[in-house]
Amino acid sequence: MPVIFKNTNALKKTIELEEISSLLNGINTLLTHQKEIEKIKGETFNIFSILGVESKENKTHSNFIAELLNPNGSHLQGSVFLELFLETIEYKNTLSFSSLNVIKEHHIGRKTNSDGGRIDILITDFNNYISIENKIYAGDQENQLIRYCNFKKECNKVYYLTLFGEEATDLSIKDSNLLTEKEGYKLKNGEDYYTLSYSYDILNWLKLCYEKSVNIPQLRESIKQYILLIQKLTNQNMNDRQKMINLLFKNHEAANVISTEFHSLRHHIRRQFREDVVKKIKQQFSDKKFEIKTPNAIHKKGIAQIFFYNKSLGINEYEFEILIESFNDNGHHNGNVFIGILDFNSNYNNYPIEEISTGFNNKYWKTAKFLYFNEKHINFRDNSFLDKIKDPNSECYKTILDVFVIQCTDFISEFNPKIEEYFKLGQHKTIQQK
């Protein structure tokens, strides 16, 4: 007599959970083995990680890549690495290496709606231009790629480099003020700009550079360290990748569920925490004329912030405000959360700069402070931190939330009166009249 299951959905769910549990156990076994191999090989020692610069876009990544690309670089290998890079990105034009320059953070003029700014890496022989916009975790700036594409437009090829080769957001490539189409002008990937990834393009190029450096120990090991860093940032630091591939595809349905759910749950945890921060701060400043805004969604590529718009100042939103960032994987300063006063367009440069943490551009930030818990930076990229706040009913969650909010409210209580006084006395008008 056949067995009849009354609740097939419950049975299916049980089987899925068993498969997921089995897959996770298998992956944990591989990761344990991986860590043992790393210890034996000495791969746990990485100078970039030790110095805390592993995700600094310009200080680390642009600098290292530009140095390898430069035919006159300290590697003393001439144009060999540059030629390998041009092959990797399938660049078709012929460059004159005798007159070639590789320039970091190249200034192309005062920033406007359609021109100017700084290109992270510029390769040029002054007849041809290759512009590389380098993004590790930072979000796009408004009209950023539009401005770079307008630089030397007829002979400039613009590349957008990210960890996994994502396309640029509309914020960077769409401008409704340039009405070449009904919906506004929008750059096209593969025509106006081209995507590159660390996970594939840069990693493959670095491996070719490593092969060319095999007989130069100091250079070879420096490139190897950087390769290990890229593998770490792109989750490819598995020595026996075939075992991982076999395990995942043997359990592909469970792997897909884990991947989807894990990203979704990380967003959920961060979204919940940001909402609770807003609620508690609103309670603290219920008598103030603040509008507290969270315009950027947690799951989107942009920086997830909280803005404190003081309506009494008589200025536009997002012009001069206190803000907290970032509540997702994006953001500056390696994802370490901070609160600060941002002069978005650098219009109020006579506002006094005080008590600013290191690494902030004083042109835009009038003051800024990192947020801490147990003397460690709060960081929403860090899964170990997300683990601490995964349950909003836990005492740990409540403690961290209270510590977070106290630091923010102390900052607002200290600096909001100073901002109000600055605008009340009309000091900002001095700037506007000039």
Image: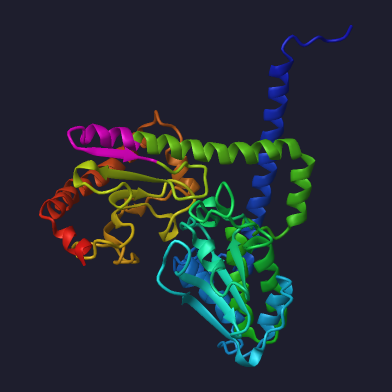
> Would you say residue 283 sits in the magenta stretch?
yes
Q: Is residue 89 left or right of residue 414?
A: right
Q: Position of residue 165 (x, y in %)?
A: 64, 58
Q: Position of residue 231 (x, y in %)?
A: 63, 62
Magenta stretch: give its range: 277-294
Q: Quadrant of residue 193?
A: bottom right
Q: Is residue 61 left or right of residue 385?
A: right
- Residue 292 visible in the shown view: yes
Q: Is residue 331 left or right of residue 313?
A: right
In this view, 168 is above or below 258: below
Q: In the displayed image of the protein, which residue is found farthest to the right?
A: 1
Depth check, front residue: 158 or 127: 127
Which residue does the image show at 76% across and 39% down from the upper left?
251
Q: Position of residue 84 (x, y in %)?
A: 71, 78
Q: In the displayed image of the protein, which residue is found farthest to the bottom?
A: 98
Q: How many numbered markers are drawn? A: 0
Q: Is residue 7 left or right of residue 280?
A: right
Q: Position of residue 43 (x, y in %)?
A: 60, 67
Q: In the displayed image of the protein, which residue is found farthest to the left?
A: 425
Q: In the displayed image of the protein, which residue is found farthest to the top?
A: 1
Depth check, front residue: 113 or 341: 113
Q: Quadrant of residue 196?
A: bottom right
Which residue does the image show at 48% across and 55% down from the upper left?
139
Which residue does the image show at 32% across and 36% down from the upper left?
278
Position of the N terminus by quadrant:
top right
In this view, 432 is above or below 290: below
Depth check, front residue: 302 or 158: 158
- Residue 373 visible in the shown view: no
Which residue does the image show at 16% across and 63% down from the upper left?
430
> Would you say residue 191 sits in the magenta stretch?
no
